[in-house]
Image (tube, rainbow, N blue to C red):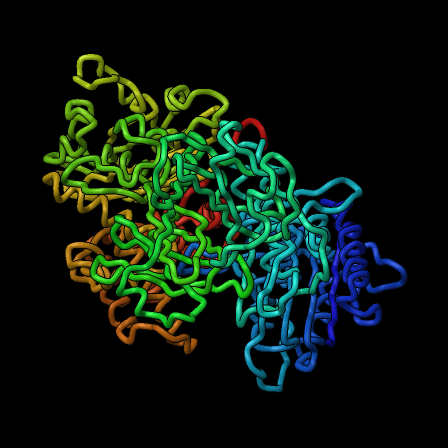
Amino acid sequence: MKAIAIVVGIDAYRDQPLTSAVHDALAFKDALLRLDLVDAGSVWLLTAPAQDGGPPATRDEITAALRHPYLHGDDIDRMFVFFSGHGILVPSSASRATSATAFLPADLTDPIAEPWKLLNIDNLLQSFRTAGPSEQFFFIDACRNLAYDAYPPDLPPIGIGGRNAPAVGGRAQGALYAVSPGGQALGSKAGLGVMTDHVIQALHGAGEALDYDDALDSYVVTMNSVYAYVKARIEALVSGLPGWQREYMLPDPAMAGRPLTPIRLVPDPPPATLTLTVEPPDEARFITACLLQRGARLADPQWPPQPFGEPVPVQPQRFRLSASSYFGATGVEPELIDARTVTTARITHKYMGPMGPGPRLHTVVAPPDDPGPGPATVAYGEGDRRLRGSIARDDPRGWLRPVAEEPWASVDIAGLEPPYLAQSVRPWQGVWSEAILPVGSYRVTFRVGGLIFSQAVAEVVRRELTVVEATSAASPLVAGVTRASRHPTTVTFSEAVGPVQADPALSLVTLIALQRVRGAEGLLDAIPRRVAAPVPAPGGWLSLAVAVDGSGWPVRANEIAAGLRAAIVEGGERRPVRLDVLTTGLQDAGLPHPGIGLDQIVTAATLVPSAGCTLAVRSELVGDVELAIASAADRVTSVGIVYRTDGAIHVAQVITPAELERAEAARHARRSLLGQWLYQRGEMVGLGLTTEPGELRDVLTGDEVDPVLSAMAFHAWSEDLAANASGMPGGNPDAARFRTRVGRHLIEAFPSSPDAVVIGALLDDGEWTRVADMATDGLTPVLAGNTRAAARMLADPRSPLSVAAGHTLPGSVWTLRRLRRGEGS
């Protein structure tokens, strides 16, 4: 197998020198050579300072090294590319909230003055997807944070073009970034970078990196298993850090093209051990236990004859533990065992006298008392008669049926073992069907657009049905307000709202804010009507609700909420906004436990002076947030904000008439949240058109105009139109017509909206002067994509809009800036 490697490590930066990047590069090169993944003569090593007479890691030298396999590498089987040094995240799209990763070469002195020297990693990956070596492995141990006050208006392509030969089929490509977008990579002074250290251990087959490939009948190390190992190690390393730091420090994989083959085979790894214990110990005599793998019951080991309480050799693979008793009920923890990292398991037994075996049901252990995806419930059992006829008796596959009550939920099913099969499913007319899958372990993820609300790892067993049922996203705040469990199957705030599974905390605070709309009082059964008094009319009003969710804060969540301060910012002037704790005066409100959960929420109502203002929410404990808020005359803007302990800030904005009855208010809230989540994922067009006319479909076709959703719809159609132009499948042939129609209707209905002004300029280049006037007035679009589009039109990195675009949180739908205080600020 012909393989090459391009290894880059840079310590010698002029402004911010590093100490570990060259060590990283040398160690990665040595690992490739030691494991016979490449020959010594097939490695390009570029460092700063240069090593052993090699070339320096300047932009020209790096691109020259990359250009050679791009132009002449079609006959090369594999390419390894490694970068260690400084990186930044640069806005890359004028129409959506997207950014690209740029690597800084050694000769770059100023990314603003010399943007052409930045190495566009996203463009590099895109270029190699149809050219060069057949299989490509990229490792980027660099930051992806917003480290500068201003950014280049455009991130140029990496500049390795000039290929004349046509592409020879699609390439298999995998990339592993040290951190998620917006994150800062960890390192050690004069030692290895944290990611590189774990990557090298993974290449040697440590822990989760050691996988088993049935097709090859061999232990292997794959790109997926390397990611699994690195992610697990980084998660353990940053577990004690504040949530906002953990969010950005986890590694980020990116796969494209056909599946990669294993990086290497690992012959005869040493066995692992597993120790089973029984509680209470004296009832172990009633228990029989065994391991199942890929749907088959293993003949060895079994308990008995293996003794409980003693280590037993097992293969370093994944298993499902099965225990039974004819004299009681058994439970196992954990049921799914990864013997590469888990060495003990526990069987509980409750003696109930002679009885037959009961149903096999596995419920995931409750998560910590913090918000996040709810654990799904997994149940195993024989498929019904209809299923048994759907595959042949000798077919080595099983069924997996996801179940969710959240409207418009999608489910991603990803295999945890080679060949890492993955698919996404949705219900058809409200009915979930079964997926037929090879036996093995799968991660099942329930989401609505870009919002994940429930997850579980389940095993598909041969000719058996595995049912995975979603629960609501976990929220201690919602549990306190509704008296529900930490992760109920669904949350019901009121009959008008219906069941909620996706982000109930954001739904709650958005609905609380909506209760100030006349006619919507009493929208929530758990919140007394008189707490959220209606805002006066007419005029443009802001109704705000902010919640602090979770228990992992340095102080109690209600203390953080009580310390929040807010202001409206316009033209450099700040006008304080009074925030009231929601529990004020609730002792006689008839609640069974006044104040539980509600004191983590503050509310406010204030007049909005003009569209394009900014809401600033300050906290000495969790940092400051600045959010561009939507506004329109004679309408109420209801804003919900949730601070989470994992560092995320969830935001919703809903604009409604000043008077609206409860059912309509609930519909507006659900529609706005659905639109936001689908837009963030790029599914607004594809799934939005399948909704009912009263939901997103009318907004997407331009039959209904909404100041926020219509702006999202315009950009969603822009993306669809761009996909059509590039020849990508699945584009809507009416994208151009709907894009123009939605944009024109938005401009006509809300001409003073900054988002409408930017969209007008995107439809008509001659309108860019209005964008300049808007910027002069200090107004900011609500959508991050519009803010970045406006900054690009102005082409002035010093303008307030360019600064706002540069400081917007990566991946945020909204023009949202976060300033952190205290540790890490």
Image vertical order of residue 707 relative to residue 608, above or below: below
In the rendering, at what x and y percent does residue 65 appear? 74, 70
The front one of 685 and 565 is 685
What is the quadrant of the C terminus in the image? top right
In the rendering, at what x and y percent does residue 522 appear? 14, 31
Q: Is residue 333 left or right of residue 694?
A: right
Q: How many marks?
A: 0
The front one of 492 and 129 is 492
Image vertical order of residue 193 relative to residue 102, above or below: above
Picture quadrant where residue 508 is located: top left
Q: Residue at x 73, y 72 (%)?
A: 3
Q: Is residue 692 left or right of residue 768?
A: left
Q: Residue at x 65, y 64 (%)?
A: 218
In the rendering, at what x and y percent does residue 746 appear? 23, 57
Q: Residue furthest top?
A: 587
Q: Residue furthest right?
A: 52
Q: Residue furthest front?
A: 354
The front one of 471 and 723 is 471
The front one of 818 and 280 is 280
Q: Residue at x 29, y 38 (%)?
A: 639
